[in-house]
Amino acid sequence: MVKTYLKTFGRMFKKHITRLVSIFLMVLVSVGFSAGIGMGKDSMVYSLSDYYKAHNVSDLIVRGAEAIPDEKLAALEERYGQENVVRGGVVETAGGELELSASPKVTLTLAGEGIGEGVTRLYIKERADKDKQNVSERREDAGISGAVLPANEFSIAAERAATDLAGVPLGETVTASAAMGAMQLFEYKFTVTEHVVGALHLAQYGDPSMQKAENGGEDDYEPLQNILYIYTDEAHPLPVFPMNEAYISVPSLKEHTLFDPNYQTALEREQAAVEEIFSDEISAERCAVLTLHENFTYRSFEEYEDKLEGIGYVIMVVFLFVTLLVVLSTMTRLLEEERGQIACLQTLGYSPLRIISKYLLFALVGTIIGGGGAFAASWGLAYIIYINFTWVYEMPPFSTHIAPLFFFIVTAVILLATLAATLIAGLRMTGRAPAALLRPKSPRPGHKVILEKIPVLWNRVSFKYKSTLRNVLRYKMRFIMTLVAVMASTGLVLAGLAVLDACLFTDVGTNAMIGVAVIVLVFAALLNAVVIYTLTNINISERERELATLMVLGYQDSEVTGYIYREVYITSGIGVALGLPFGALLCFFVFKVMNDFATLSSINWFVWLLAPLLSLLFTFFVTLLLRRKITGIKMNESLKAVE
């Protein structure tokens, strides 16, 4: 008896393999996207945090209008340790010139290949402190050591060439000459011996870093054209350049992940302590204490993280809703198909829980296999999202740190909801008498549909469309579930297109966000296709006897397929039409959680046309895929089977 019961497992899985595949695909697409967005956000945070620790990026930078006083530097060293405080300087030239003093007027001029009309920033650091903080990553070496340089020349590093960074060639000599009127005061020569990626300048665009202090928080600060790193020591002093910066690395902050609440709290505490040390200079507006929030690279990373999290949460809810709806529909309708099998097991004395267990196992297997595939898909998606940001940044290595919490939460929600619904439907089914289950399910009684009450319209409809409309509206629950699923998936397609449109045409995004928008669109399209395929496939499976009857009556293949296709197209068409207002609502929430990324009015008109057209196109291709299933129905077997 146990052996017989076990055989039913294999037969059920074989018979309903398409339903199992449907559950697998729904979970794969939904969980893969939802967890992938979450893991993509986490990978950015962990990768940037690993880089921050490995390169000992400064947590705080004190920037003054004049050189940092020795007593202030000593106070910083006492609080944070001498090894965690580095003195340096920063000057900027616009158009190659910098006014060093107003009276008498002294002008510093930079000249050399790559030094143009844009802003060039020079960082000055003591050579002994070169490798302690903000460690640059070397990219190219000219093979020129300090020993072979002339006595009056200095070795410098230049930021690598990027999108808006011109980049000074290796071996190029940059001259820095100071003059007071027509009188030449001095001239320095700097030879570029290496190209580097500065730890504070990961953006490939000219980086308006620390713009809060330099431009009052404005966002239109002129991008940098070049960044040079000049190292000096007692043997090679550069007295004209003020050492007006102090870089502070707070050891306790390195224990935290960047920008998490604990980091934020500790950072604010340390910023307040440093501001207290420099209170006189700050009150006179001669000094500012900056954090990574004022750095363009790190701040934009944080903003992208927030945008990813926002779009992930909103769209995840819709993905999960559609997935639950379709998976629950799949399992409840499977139990209806298995009513005869359930009745037989009841007559053999099996308990309701034991009967239901195999259907719970069916749902469990489909969800777990889908979840396994989704984990791989989500990790791959997180990597793709991460790679997208290489178009904008010199990204640190992809962190191998995996945060699976988001994945397990999403999978658990789907799994528990599916098992609960299967259990409830199974208990309802096993609560009925075996004799009632063995009898064929009585067809629903015919009722006039709402259109029949409008003779002006109904009398103009041909017979085949009258039967189609009756079938569509006869099974209200099936119609509503399909309608809602198609509506939601169409809304997701519209949201994906709207975000992509905002990035491409309204200039509010970057290449990285374009990549994310494309990912949203692709997964929304996949979900749309899987939803239509699953629900249509179930519809065909439940009506094999009805379709076989039409074949026996002499209907051609095109007429039989049209019988189903018309129902699919009508239901999908209504769902797509409702998907537009739903998609508009979804876009509104997506834009809001992405910090007003765009507005509904900024969406181009063709997006509103393209979204429904894509959904209808997916429907068309799905019906083509299912044509063979319809025409391949075996008439004799279907007519003999009990529904």
Image: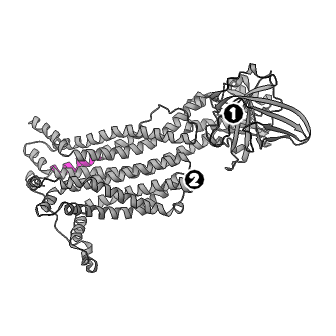
In the image, residue 347 lies at what x, y percent?
A: 7, 46
Residue 162 visible in the displayed image: yes
**In the depicted structure, whether residue 511 falls above or below residue 192:** below
User: In the image, which is nearer the foreground, mark 1 or mark 2?
Assistant: 1
**Disc 1 packing (10 Å; few <14; some 14–19; many ≥20):** some
Query: 495 left or right of 58?
Result: left
**Disc 2 packing (10 Å; few <14; some 14–19; many ≥20):** few
Q: Which residue is at 30% across, 54% downward? A: 622
Query: 44 left or right of 490?
Result: right
Reply yes or no: does residue 420 show up in magenta. Answer: yes
Q: Which residue is at 50% across, 39% downward? A: 387
Residue 485 visible in the displayed image: no
In the image, residue 451 lies at what x, y percent?
A: 27, 74
In the image, residue 272 lies at what x, y percent?
A: 68, 38
- Looking at the rendered image, the quarter that the C terminus falls into is bottom left
Label 1 to label 2: alpha-carbon separation: 33 Å
In the image, residue 419 lies at what x, y percent?
A: 27, 45
- Which of these two is toward me, 271 or 198? 198
Q: Circle 1 sits in a helix, a strand or a loop, which is it? A: loop
Toward which corner of the image does residue 12 lie, by quadrant? top left
Who comes first in sequence, dot 1 or dot 2?
Answer: 1
Question: Callout 1, which amino acid?
Answer: Pro
The residue segment tinted magenta is 418-430
Instruction: State the residue position of label 2.
Output: 508
Instruction: State the residue position of label 1.
Output: 169
